[in-house]
């Protein structure tokens, strides 16, 4: 199965945000290359909010290009068999935390936003950090920091706050 096919299946199984989900499906129906960065009309991305539920905190990255505190995530790559694989790879690469595991049940939210390269049709997962997780900053970040759940609203935009709320509802 191709990554494009996986994305369609994931979205068809996603419950909630029906109108936005349909926008994603319409994009993929019109664009066989819609999961790849090369698709200038926009592309599906995968992200993972790294959560440490034991300590009530999340790991956010100060994104180098966007200059905002965001969840880890980014473009799909040819080695990604599934969107979940892409989200977990991005979470691990950008956090430096080995042993992350995605919260069961598939994506927790969708968020479509414009970036300098194109529209991102972001499929957002939550990744659980193992006990004692230690972060390591990547070259894609200006900073990497743990924030208590109640601090996120003061540093991040509403899309990250909504992602945290959806992830916590699933814990």
Image (cartoon, rainbow, N blue to C red):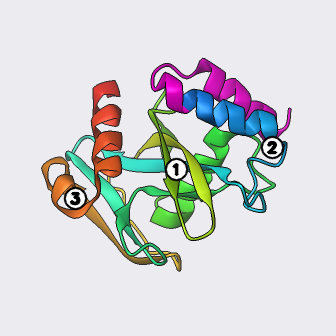
**Which residue is labeled 3 in the image?**
147
In this picture, residue 167 sits left or right of residue 118: left
In this picture, residue 47 sits left or right of residue 137: right
Q: Residue at x 39, y 50 (%)?
A: 50
Q: Is residue 159 above or below residue 103?
A: below
Secondary structure under tag 1 reads: strand
Rendering quarter of residue 10: top right
> Callout 2: few (<14), some (14-19), or many (20+) C-alpha neighbours within 10 Å?
some
Secondary structure under tag 2 reads: loop
Magenta range is 1-20
Q: Residue at x 79, y 53 (%)?
A: 79
> Is residue 139 inside the magenta stretch?
no
**Which residue is labeled 1 in the image?**
47
Residue 74 visible in image:
yes
Residue 99 visible in image:
no
In this picture, residue 90 sits left or right of residue 110: right
Lower sequence index among marks 1 and 3: 1
Q: Is residue 127 above or below residue 118?
A: above
> Is residue 14 inside the magenta stretch?
yes
x, y (%) of residue 88? 57, 48
The label number, if any, that marks residue 31 in the structure image: 2
Mark nearest the camera among 3 and 2 is 2
Q: Closer to the camera, 147 or 162?
A: 162
* CB atoms of marks 1 and 2 within 8 Å: no
Q: Closer to the camera, 112 or 3?
A: 112
């Amino acid at each position: 199965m191709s990554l494009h096919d996986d994305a369609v299946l994931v979205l068809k199984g996603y419950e909630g945000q029906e109108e936005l989900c349909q926008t994603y499906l319409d994009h993929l129906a019109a664009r066989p290359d819609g999961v790849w960065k090369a698709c200038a009309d926009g592309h599906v991305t995968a992200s993972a909010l790294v959560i440490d539920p034991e300590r009530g905190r999340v790991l956010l990255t100060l994104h180098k290009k966007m200059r905002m505190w965001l969840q880890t995530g980014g473009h799909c790559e040819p080695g990604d068999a599934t969107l979940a694989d892409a989200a977990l790879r991005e979470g691990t690469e950008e956090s430096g935390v080995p042993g992350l595991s995605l919260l069961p049940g598939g994506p927790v939210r969708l968020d479509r936003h414009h970036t300098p390269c194109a529209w991102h049709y972001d499929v957002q997962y939550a990744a659980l950090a193992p006990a004692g997780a230690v972060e390591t900053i990547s070259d894609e970040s200006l900073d990497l920091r743990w924030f208590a759940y109640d601090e996120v609203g003061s540093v991040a935009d509403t899309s990250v706050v909504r992602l945290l709320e959806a992830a916590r509802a699933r814990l």
